């Protein structure tokens, strides 16, 4: 059985879940899921590379995915995550 595919909200490519970062909006705050902590709520996936993270700032992809303004600190945290 193959690994489930998810789509990056920036480049729109389908990739296996382990190649993407899962972001979750839960109780009004945005969380980056990791191996230790799983959050539940509205989710979006983004590739684990700097080009997709930089493009998400320009395209405002995460803003559209979560229907709210995403602070710059979140993007800074994403770059540390990769």
Image (cartoon, rainbow, N blue to C red):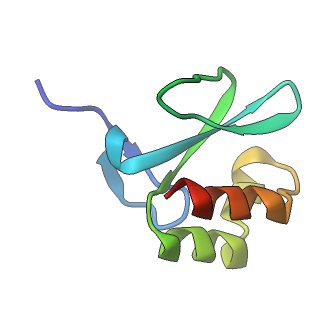
Which residue shows up at 54% across the image and 64% down it?
10
Q: Does residue 50 appear to the left or right of 13 in the view shown?
A: right
Instruction: Count the marks.
Output: 0
Q: Quadrant of residue 57?
A: bottom right
- Position in image of residue 38 (x %, y %): 58, 22
Q: Relative to residue 57, is residue 22 depicted above or below?
A: above
- Position in image of residue 78 (x %, y %): 62, 57
Q: Camera-side residue: 36 or 61?
A: 36
Q: Does residue 68 appear to the left or right of 78 in the view shown?
A: right
Q: Quadrant of residue 59?
A: bottom right
Q: Does residue 1 appear to the left or right of 26 in the view shown?
A: left
Q: Quadrant of residue 3?
A: top left
Farthest residue toward the left?
1
- Position in image of residue 60 (x %, y %): 73, 68
Which quadrant, please, contains the N terminus? top left
Which residue shows up at 86% across the image and 24% down it?
27
Q: Relative to residue 70, is residue 35 depicted above or below?
A: above
Which residue shows up at 44% across the image and 58% down it?
48
- Position in image of residue 49 (x %, y %): 44, 67
Q: Relative to residue 15, is residue 75 depicted above or below?
A: below
Which residue shows up at 47% across the image and 29% down it?
35
Q: Camera-side residue: 2 or 23?
A: 23
Q: Does residue 30 appear to the left or right of 52 in the view shown?
A: right
Q: Relative to residue 39, is residue 48 depicted above or below?
A: below
């Amino acid at each position: 059985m193959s690994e489930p595919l998810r789509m990056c909200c920036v480049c729109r490519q389908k990739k296996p879940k382990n190649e993407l970062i899962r972001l979750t909006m839960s109780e009004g705050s945005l969380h980056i899921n990791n191996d230790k902590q799983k959050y539940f709520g509205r989710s979006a996936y983004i590739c684990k590379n700097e080009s997709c993270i930089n493009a998400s700032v320009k395209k405002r992809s995460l803003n559209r995915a979560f229907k709210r303004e995403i602070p710059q600190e979140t993007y800074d945290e994403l770059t540390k995550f990769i």
